[in-house]
Amino acid sequence: MCVNQKTSRGTESADSGAARKPQVVIVGAGFGGLAAAKALADAPVAVTVVDRQNYHLFQPLLYQVATAALSPGDIAWPIRRLLRRQPNARVLLGEVTVVDTARKVLHMGKRSLPYDYLVLSTGVRHDYFGRGDWERFAPGLKHLDDATAIRRRILSAFEQAEMETDERERKRLLTFVIVGAGPTGVELAGAIAELARKALSADFRLIDPRTAPASCSSRPARASCRPSPRPSRSSPWPRSGGSGWRYA
Ligand SMILES: Cc1cc2nc3c(=O)[nH]c(=O)nc-3n(C[C@H](O)[C@H](O)[C@H](O)COP(=O)(O)OP(=O)(O)OC[C@H]3O[C@@H](n4cnc5c(N)ncnc54)[C@H](O)[C@@H]3O)c2cc1C
C-alpha cells in the first residue's frame, strides 16, 4: 500500500516509526464508525476516527430530548471516552471536506490526513421528498439542534396557550400534528401525549394539557394514530431521570 509520506505544513505524517502500522482512517463516529473502530481493537493497525462533532449521538432517543424527557447530554457521549480503552485508536475533531482517493489523503479544511484504508461512515440526512419548503415549519429530527428546536416549540405552545383567551386559538396551540407514522413519528406522538397528560398536567392553571391531541399521519394510507402515551423504556442507554421542562 503506497502512501505519500511527505509531510508539509498542516499535513499529518502516517509514518510514526520504524514499525509502521497500516493507517485506518474512519470518518464518522456514529453507530457504523464506532463499530468499525471497535472491531479493529485487536488488529495490527493504527485507527484514526475523525468526526466533525466531539460526541457520538444516540439518535434513537432524540425524540425524548424533543419532548423534554431527556437532556441533550443524556444521549451524546464524548467519542474520546468511548474509545479511551482502545490503545490503537485516536480521535480527531474535524470536518472532512475532500477525499483524494488517488493520493489516499483526506482533507479537513487546511489539514490533510493520509490513510492506507478508509472507512466512510458519515450517515445520512433527512429528506422532505421534494417538499423542502416544509422544513421551515417542521424541522427534521436528526441532530441535537433539531431536538432542542422541537422541544422549544412544544413547550412554548403550552405557555402561549396558558395566556391565550380565545378558545379556538388555544385549541390550535395545543394541537400537534406529526407527518410520518414510522417508528419515530409514533414514538414522538406517544411522548407528546405523555408530556401533556402526565408531566405537565398539574403545572398549568388555565389550560388542561391533557386535552392536547397529538396525532400522526402517513402516506399512502393517511392513517391517523394515537399511540400509547407511554414511550418505550427498553433502551440500554443510561437515563438521567429527566431534564426538567426547560426551553433550550
Ligand atoms: C429520530 C431517529 C430515531 C431512530 N430510531 C432508531 C431505532 O429505534 N432503531 C434503530 O436501529 N435505528 C434507529 N435510527 C437510525 C439510526 O440512528 C441510524 O441508522 C444510525 O444512527 C446511522 O448510523 P451511522 O453511523 O450510519 O450514521 P450517523 O449516526 O448519522 O453518524 C454519522 C457521523 O458522521 C459524522 N460526519 C458526517 N459527515 C462528516 C464529515 N464530512 N466529516 C466528519 N464527520 C462527519 C457525523 O457528525 C456523525 O457523527 C433512528 C434515527 C433517527 C434519526
Image: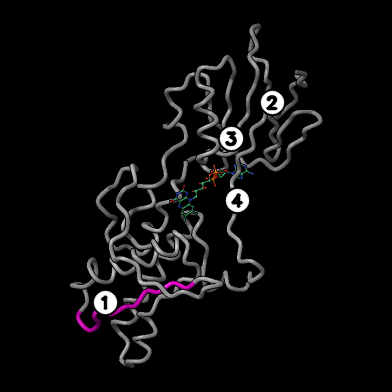
Alpha carbon separation for disc pair 2 and 3: 12 Å
- Mark 1 = which residue? 209
Q: Which of the image's four quarters has the C terminus?
A: bottom left
The picture places residue 158, in percent across and down from the top left corner, at 32, 76
Return the residue nearer the eye: 197 or 227. 227
In the image: residue 131, left or right of residue 184:
right
SS at mark 3 in the image: strand
The earlier-in-sequence mark between 1 and 4 is 4
Confirm or deny contact between disc 2 and disc 3 (CB under 8 A): no
Q: Depth-wise, is mark 1 or mark 3 nearer the camera? A: 1
Q: What percent of the width, then of the height, locates residue 142?
A: 51, 55
Q: Position of residue 27 (x, y in %)?
A: 61, 36
Q: CB at mark 4 closer than 8 A to ligand 1?
A: yes
Disc 2 residue type (three-letter) = Tyr
The residue pinned by badge 2 equals: 115
- Sequence-first disc among 2 and 4: 2
